[in-house]
Image (tube, rainbow, N blue to C red):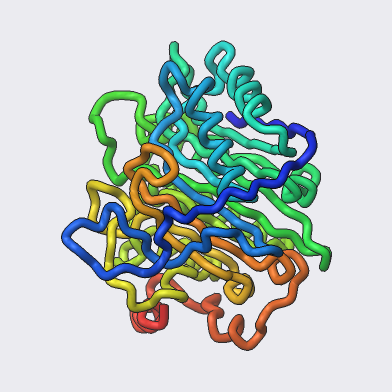
Amino acid sequence: MSLTDTSDSTDSNNDILFSNLNTDNHNPSSSQDDLWFGSFQNNKPSNTFRILFHNINGLQGRHAFDETIPSIINDQQILEIDHQGITEHCLNLRFRSTAYKLQNSIKTSTERKTHHQFSCGNLTTSSEYLPGGTASITMGNAVGRISPQGKGSDRMGRWTYTTFNRTDNTKLTIITAYQVNRTPTNQIGITAWHQQRLQLDQEGKTSIHPRKAFIDDLIKFITEKQQSGHSIIVGGDFNETIDKQSSGILRLITATNLIDPWSHRFPHTPSFNTYSRGSDRIDHVFCTPSLISSIQSIGYAPFRWITNSDHRALLIDFNINMLFHGKHNSTTDDKLKTRHLKTNDKKALTTFINQL
């Protein structure tokens, strides 16, 4: 199930500085929770399109609509984020007035032009709480770039997407995705894993694991967009690294010819965790190779930097002219092409990973 809404009002300027943020690369330490990895510019440069992806670890609770959502919207304004992708909002959009309260909370939290897209699974429950879900919130001038009918979501709430027009008559689709764990956190319950297992069973796909179904379906969705000439940015919580040969997301980016801009920009950065109780980078962003040259900065924030979440937020800045007007470095793009890789070609995959 998905929910969309667009609110029109007058944009306002915000001159707040972020002098308390340390954005340099850090050396690994015994405690990395408070460290930035990569880069992030405190004052957003002009002609910049800023994207944020983060697992917010749930919006449910007594104060979701009168405190948490307004806080998220306020942070988006202060940080001048054009488009933010949210995973695990845990809102049941089918429950009573949840959808109305969500729309009203976002509308009353800002005077800026705003478009939001929320999606969740199809399980009917007796509360506002439903694990999983994805969402996106676009704000300011970026709203005017959204293509008509250029937004939607997966049937299980596994991803949400927004498509933007570009001046060269091509389009850019930004996808926010959430892949469940390999096994459910609880053996019995209504976790996102259980919801997807139930949905797949109802569709007669009893032998397909929820994670394989996710990768298969996302590959199909992205491929269809690419065949229509879309460039792709997909980010979110994938609960998986690309460092293993069995990795589903390695299969995803190989099949769709996408690039990991973090590994491209910081190939020698020591390993770090993006989940507080984990040890690996499981929150990612991938993009069409031609977009690499338009990236100005990319960085992972400290834990609980923007929300009280146990996942690091991921921020990425693009040059607007290069992103939306098609001015790219073809030499760099050609070096990054991977469309001929196959998941069963171990030699080619090893070369690809080493180059990243």
Q: Is residue 119 above or below residue 337?
A: above
Residue at 77% in and 51% down: 145
Percent across and percent down for residue 333 are: 60, 81
Residue at 51% in and 39% down: 134
Q: Is residue 27 left or right of residue 96?
A: left
| Image quarter of residue 348 | bottom left
Q: Is any atom of residue 212 visible in this view?
A: no
| Image quarter of residue 347 | bottom left
Residue situated in front as seen by the camera: 210 or 3 = 3
The quarter of the image holding the N terminus is top right
Percent across and percent down for residue 354 are: 36, 81
Residue at 55% in and 29% down: 70
Q: Is any atom of residue 186 visible in this view?
A: yes
Residue situated in front as seen by the camera: 266 or 209 = 266
Percent across and percent down for residue 31 are: 20, 56
Residue at 44% in and 11% down: 126
Q: Is residue 326 left or right of residue 109?
A: right
| Image quarter of residue 165 | bottom right
Percent across and percent down for residue 103 are: 64, 24
Say how many tags the image has. Answer: 0
The quarter of the image holding the C terminus is bottom left
Q: Is residue 54 left or right of residue 330?
A: left
Q: Residue furthest left?
A: 30
